[in-house]
Amino acid sequence: MALRRYVQAMKFAAPLISGRLIQRYKRFLADVRLHNGTTITATCPNTGSMMGLTAPGSAVWLSTSDSPTRKYKHTWEMIEADAGSGPTLVGINTNHTNTLVTEAIETALIPELKGFGSLRREVKYGLNSRIDILLEGGPGGRSCYVEVKNVHLMRQPGLAEFPDSKTERGVKHLGELSAMVAEGHRAVMVYLVQRGDAERFAVAQDIDPAYGAAFARAAEAGVEMLCYGCRLTSEAIVVERRIEIAD
């Protein structure tokens, strides 16, 4: 029953429409040619490099908003990509990540984060930061600080990686999680892979050596590292399995 409620919660409000990517530009925009021949501009809700996910001609899926205040009514949600093991849908909308993990916690799909009395999002902590998810009222009265990262990079078949570009913000988050552990709390980094072909996860040390070093320091300090994968369709995104983190 819990899983069914979760799937319902993560269904797209309306069927996604498909087309072919013309180009992504200015980071936040993408031109797409729909199957009826119309060319539209869609919002690209992803600040990363999107390495390997911007090839012109790729099949993409968009959601549609009827809000009269939006300049662009379409949002880029998914792209079809092939990292060597066959085509798969990849979710590029990072705005869904925290909601997906929140729902997965609330419906006990992440057993490592069960047993807490309350869940709050975007809570101030550390040095002028906000934690993605704060779990309170856990065993022994401990709180758990949960940071979430969206993952969609794959350069080798089956191996998901993060980050896809340098991230000073990500380094900062790992340091702040370590500080929470030092204060006696639990701290967990959750990497959510929005693609169905991932079998393992690793930090992309060559892309951001500073993040790789921060990851190692945080793990040594007691920050727990988790990775979960998603099943994606044009109707819904579902968190469904834990993924091994490579050494």
Image (cartoon, helix red, strand yellow):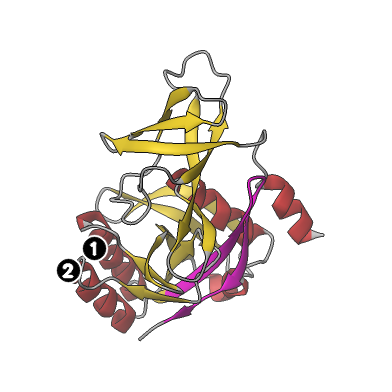
Q: Is residue 228 left or right of residue 1?
A: left
- Can you say whether 60 is above or below 203 in the image? above
The kind of secondary structure the magenta stretch mainly shows is strand
What residue is at 42 percent from the left and 59 percent from the top?
A: 152
- Quadrant for the C terminus, please: bottom left
Question: Which mark sits nearer the N-terminus, 1 or 2?
Answer: 1
- Of all residues shown, which one is farthest toward the bottom? 247
Instruction: Give x and y (percent) for residue 150.
Output: 42, 57
Which element type, helix, strand or loop, lies under badge 1? helix
Instruction: Give x and y (percent) for residue 227.
Output: 48, 71
Q: Is residue 134 left or right of residue 106?
A: left
Q: Is there a contact, CB below 8 Å, between mark 1 and mark 2? A: yes
Q: Which residues are magenta?
A: 225-245
- Quadrant for the N terminus, please: bottom right
Q: CA distance from mark 1 to mark 2?
A: 7 Å
Which element type, helix, strand or loop, lies under badge 2? helix
Is there any visible trace of residue 60 in the rendered image?
yes
- Of all residues shown, which one is farthest toward the left? 210
Residue type, numbered disc 1: Val
Magenta stretch holds residue 243: yes
User: In front: 26, or 219?
Assistant: 26
Is there any visible trace of residue 117 in the rendered image?
no
- Can you say whether 185 is above or below 34 in the image? below
Residue at image mark 1: 171
Instruction: Give x and y (percent) for residue 212.
Output: 24, 73
Q: Which mark is residue 210?
A: 2
What residue is at 26 percent from the left and 48 percent from the top?
A: 128
Crowd class of label 1 (few under 14; some 14 to 19; many from 20; radius 10 Å): some
What residue is at 34 percent from the left and 56 percent from the top?
A: 52
Q: For marks 1 and 2, give the one nearer the viewer.
A: 2
